[in-house]
Every structure is written in structure tokens, then in C-alpha cells.
Image: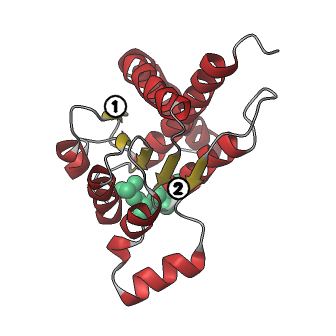
Amino acid sequence: MDTVERIQQHFNASIDTKVLASQALPESIAHAGSMMVESLLNDGKILSCGNGGSAGDAQHFSSELLNRFERERPSLPAMALTTDTSTLTSIANDYSYNEIFSKQIRALGQPGDVLLAISTSGNSANVIQAIQAAHEKEMRVIALTGKDGGNMAALLSPEDCEIRVPSTVTARIQEVHLLVIHCLCDLIDETLFGGMD
Ligand SMILES: O=C(CO)[C@@H](O)[C@H](O)[C@H](O)[C@H](O)COP(=O)(O)O
Ligand SMILES: [Zn+2]
């Protein structure tokens, strides 16, 4: 296979995964969007976390709430737990990498807040501990997963919401996670500020 064919294969695989996801995911995305709106309307906030590409996704989401998505509107309360290197390195150094998110959630989480927990495998131990800490804090969890949902899927409560991308390929799952995040931002803006512009 030459380079151009290889690149076209990536595009086609991404398109195929998105077509499958467009059939499987809209109801759970709509549910997750309404969970976020309910939290924001009740003075809640949205904390987000993940590793690697999913850390980038967590920050992408929080920046779209704190700053803006596609329209002019007030800033919305969100915080990525992946950005404060002093906090992250000290928790990992003194305790464990598995606790880098959960310790922040125990300090910052309030009942009614939402945790956006992102993991393509559903098996990252620090994201799993983040979900456990969120439950202790009476937060609801929106889990972006893939593959078989991993251990995260089994940990979710009936009040939570899993959005599981129908793929086993990490990169393809991440590409759909970003699209899901943009859908959630659009649902939040349309519900809270629809008709403003
Ligand atoms: O972006 C990629 C692969 O596309 C990697 O950085 C990937 O995010 C890392 O391997 C993560 O540690 C994977 O964690 P997870 O999605 O299984 O929770
Ligand atoms: Zn990646």
C-alpha cells in the first residue's frame, strides 16, 4: 500500500466509525447533554479527566465551556483536572499516579457536579478512581469510553451515563470522542442560550 492509500484508509476508517456512532450514540449523547444542563442550571460545575489524547479532550471540553463554543454567551463553570503540573506531580510522587484525579475531586467536587471521565479502554486506573471519588461526592458521571467499556462501565450507577464508541481502535475512538464533546457543547449552548443569536 502506498502512502496516499494508507492515509485514505485512515480517513475511511474514521468515517465508517462515525457512521456507526451516528446510529448508536445520539440518545446517550442527548441524555448526557441534559445531565450537564441540569447541573449547570443548579449552580453545578463540570470536572473532566483522562490520559494522553483523552487529557487533551478533557481540556478541549473545559476550554469550550470556560471561554466559548460557537456563539457569544457567558462563561460556564468547568475545570480539567489534567493541567496543574504541581498538583499532578506531587500527588503522583507522594501517593500514586492512580490518585491524581481522585484527590482533586475529593477537594473540589460538590453534590450535583458532573465528572466527564474519558478513557478509550475504560480501564485507566486513575479515571476509575476518579469515578469512585465522584460517587463519594454525590456527583453524576458521564463516561466517554470505547472497546467493551472496560472496568469503568461496570462501575457506573443508574444515574450516570456511558457513551461507548463502537470501535476497538484507540485513535478512531478518540476521533469520535471529540465529535461527542462538540455535540455536548452544542446541546448546552442551544438549551441554555438558544435564540440569543
Ligand atoms: O492518544 C493516544 C493514542 O491515540 C495515547 O496518548 C493514549 O491516549 C494513551 O495511550 C492513554 O494512556 C490511553 O488511555 P485510555 O484511553 O485507555 O484511558
Ligand atoms: Zn491519539
Q: In this orientation, which residue lies closer to the viewer: 59 or 107?
A: 107
Which residue is rendered at x = 50% and y = 62% of the image?
52
**Amino acid identity at mark 2:** Gly
Q: Secondary structure at mark 1?
A: loop
Which of the 4 quarters of the picture holds residue 21?
Answer: top left
Res. 111 in view: yes
* Residue 62 pos. (x, y %): 61, 47
Q: Secondary structure at mark 2?
A: helix
Question: Please, what is the three-letter code of the amino acid marked with disc 1?
Answer: Pro
| Residue 38 coordinates in the image, percent (x, y) | 47, 27
Return the mark for residue 166.
1
Q: Which residue is mark 2?
A: 53
- Looking at the image, in which quadrant does ligand 1 appear? bottom left
Q: Residue 183: x and y, percent?
A: 57, 26
Count of numbered tags: 2
CB of residue at label 2: within 8 Å of ligand 1? yes
**Residue reaching furthest to the left:** 154
Is the residue indicated by label 1 positioned so its CB lies within 8 Å of ligand 1? Answer: no
What distance separates the C-alpha of mark 1 from that of mark 2?
18 Å
User: Along the line of sight, which residue is nearer the eye, 105 or 155?
Assistant: 105
Q: Does label 1 or label 2 sit earlier along the sequence?
A: 2
Q: Indicate whether 105 appears above or below 75.
A: below
